[in-house]
Amino acid sequence: CNGMGLLAKVGVGSIEELRIPERGFSSMGLRLLDLDKRLWNDYWVNGKSGVLTTPGLTGHFENGVGTFTAEETEDGKIVIGGYFSTLQPTGAATATTRNRIARLNADGTLDTAFNPNANYEVYTVAAQADGKILLGGWFTTLQPNGAATATSRNKIARLNADGTLDATFNPNANESVQSLAVQADGKILLGGWFTTLQPNGAAAAVTRKRIARLNADGSLDTGFDPSVEGNYYSFVAQ
C-alpha cells in the first residue's frame, strides 16, 4: 500500500486492472517511468501466476500523447503484438480486424497483406536477420493470411516474412513465452513461465524451467539449461 502511495505522489508510475471474464483472467498493468532516460516501461502481472512480465513496450508521453516502440524489421516495417483486435492507423476511415499481431508500413499505415491472426495475447516479438519473425505469448493457434483453418502453435511460433507460418518451427512450450532474443549465431533465447518444451514433433517433452535456447531450426540446444527455480523476469543477449 505504501509503495502504491509513493508512485502516485511522485508521479513516476500508474497502475491499471485488466479483466477478461470469459477466460477467467485478471491482471494488473504497471507503467513505470525511468527518470534518467525519461522513458516509460509497461509491465503486466498475471493474476494466476503473480509473475511480472518483462516490458512489452517502451516509450514516452508528450503533450498527452504516448509514443511506444515495437520490433522493426529491416525494410522499415514495424511488427506489433498485444491484446488488441482492431487497428485504425493514420486516420483510416474504419478499423481493420487484426487479432493480437499486426504489421505497419514505415509511414504507420497498415500492411494489409500481413495477418497472422493469433487467438490469444502476443507478449513479445523478435525479427531475425533473414526476415522471419518470432512470436511469443499465450496463444495456442495462428491462422495466417486467410488460411482455411487454424494451426496449433503453443506459446511460440515463427512467421515467414510474408506473415505465413513457418511450418518447420514448433518449439511447443507448455506455458507462456514472455521474452525472445536472437543471438548473433542465429540461436534463439526464450524466457517465460514454461517448464517444458517439445520441439518439432519430438516424442517427449523436455524439462526447461523458465529459460531455454533453441537452435535456428527450432530444435532444443541441449547444452543450455539454466533451470530457473524462482520467478523469471527478463534477460538480455550480449
Image (cartoon, rainbow, N blue to C red):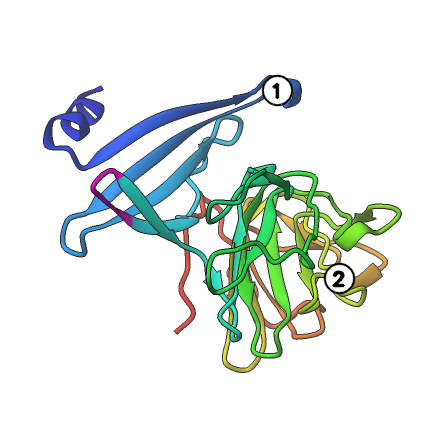
- Boundaries of the magenta span: 60-64
**Alpha carbons under labels 1 and 2: distance apart:** 31 Å
The residue most toward the left is 10
**Residue at (45, 31) in percent of width and height:** 50
User: How many residues crowd around disc 2 within 10 Å: few (fewer than 14), some, or many (20 or more)?
Assistant: some
In the image, residue 139 lies at what x, y percent? Answer: 67, 43
**Residue 89 visible in the snapshot:** yes
Viewer-nearest residue: 234 or 123: 123
- Per the image, the residue denoted by label 1 is 24
Give the mark, 1 or 2, whose residue is nearer the N terminus.
1
Name the residue carrying label 2: 164
Q: Which residue is situated farthest in the front direction here?
A: 93
Dot 2: what SS? loop
Marks 1 & 2, CB-CB < 8 Å contact: no
Which amino acid lies under the numbered mark 2 shown in the image of this protein? Thr
| Residue 223: quadrant of the picture | bottom right
In the rendered image, which quarter is residue 23 located in? top right
User: Quadrant where the N terminus lies?
Assistant: top left
Is 203 situated left or right of 205 in this image? Answer: right
* Residue beneath the point at 64% across and 41% down: 99
Q: Quadrant of the C terminus?
A: bottom left
On the image, the x and y values in percent for residue 12 come to 18, 37
Label 1 secondary element: loop
Q: Is residue 178 visible?
A: no
Which is closer to the viewer, label 1 or label 2?
2
Q: Nearer the viewer, residue 75 or 26?
A: 75
Q: Residues within 10 Å of mark 1 (few under 14, many from 20)?
A: few
Position of residue 146 measured from the top left corner of the image (x, y, whole percent)? 80, 50
Up-down: is 222 above or below 113? below
Tell me which amino acid carries mark 1.
Gly
**Residue 90: x, y in percent?**
46, 49
Question: Magenta includes 115?
Answer: no
